[in-house]
Image: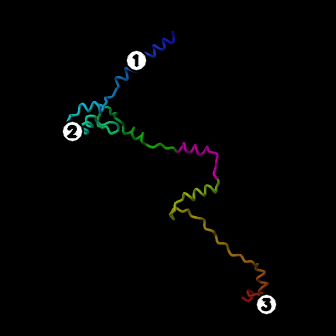
Amino acid sequence: MSASLIRRGLELLNDDFKDSSKGKKKKQTPSSAKVMDLVSTKRQGVTRQKKRLQGRQGPGRSKATVKDKKIKSAVEEFRKKKEKSHLSTNLKYFMETTCKATDSDTMKIINHNSGRQSRHQRERPVKKAKEPQSLFTEEEFQQFQKEYFGRTVEENK
């Protein structure tokens, strides 16, 4: 008995859906077979007349009618088209990742992405010139002067 009640209820619902769909059918353009009956028997301009009677179909259809047009608010349109900021979601994603790149990898990426023009190049640290160091100490120089000259040259000055 319960199965029959369910079946009966589904039939009633099905009838309601069929009735509502009949009222919302769009006006269709006549098919090519019906249009050929409407076209005159003259030879010239048959295809053009057929296209005119059949009307535009699909995306090229004229949208100049006001019948189904909804009034849209400029503010609502702006809000729909405005780009949303994904900064917070991106930050959460990158902060949660546990993998960290090595310093050498990050330097490779930075160097690769820097531009080719001179104004885009990073300033490289200037290397300080080291003072030339002598192989000999000051004492060894003085000893050489005494042996070669017999005296130190700096003493006479």
What residue is rendered at 22% in x and 40% in y? 45
Instruction: Tell me which amino acid carries mark 2.
Output: Arg
Q: Judging from the image, what secondary structure is the residue with disc 1 in?
A: helix
Q: Which mark is residue 150?
A: 3
Residues rendered magenta in the picture = 87-101
Instruction: Tell me which amino acid carries mark 1.
Output: Asp
Q: Is residue 108 above or below residue 127?
A: above
Residue most extreme to the top: 1
Q: Judging from the image, what secondary structure is the residue with disc 3 in?
A: loop
Residue holding disc 2: 43
Q: Is residue 52 above or below residue 156?
A: above
Tell me the distance, in whole angstroms, between the alpha carbons under discs 2 and 1: 49 Å
Point out residue 50 in the picture as x, y percentages from the top left corner: 26, 36
Observer-side mark, 1 or 3, equals 1
Instruction: Tell me which amino acid carries mark 3.
Output: Gly
Tell which of 106 and 14 is nearer to you. 14
Does the stretch in magenta take in 100?
A: yes
Q: Main secondary structure of the magenta part?
A: helix
Q: Are marks 2 and 3 in contact (CB under 8 Å)?
A: no
Mark 3 closeness class: few <14, some 14–19, many ≥20 residues within 10 Å: few
Does the stretch in magenta take in 9?
A: no
Point out residue 107 in the picture as x, y percentages from the top left corner: 61, 57
Observer-side mark, 2 or 3, equals 2
What residue is rendered at 60% in x and 65% in y? 125
Tell me the distance, in whole angstroms, between the alpha carbons under discs 2 and 3: 131 Å
* Mark 2 vs 1, N-terminal side: 1
Mark 2 closeness class: few <14, some 14–19, many ≥20 residues within 10 Å: few
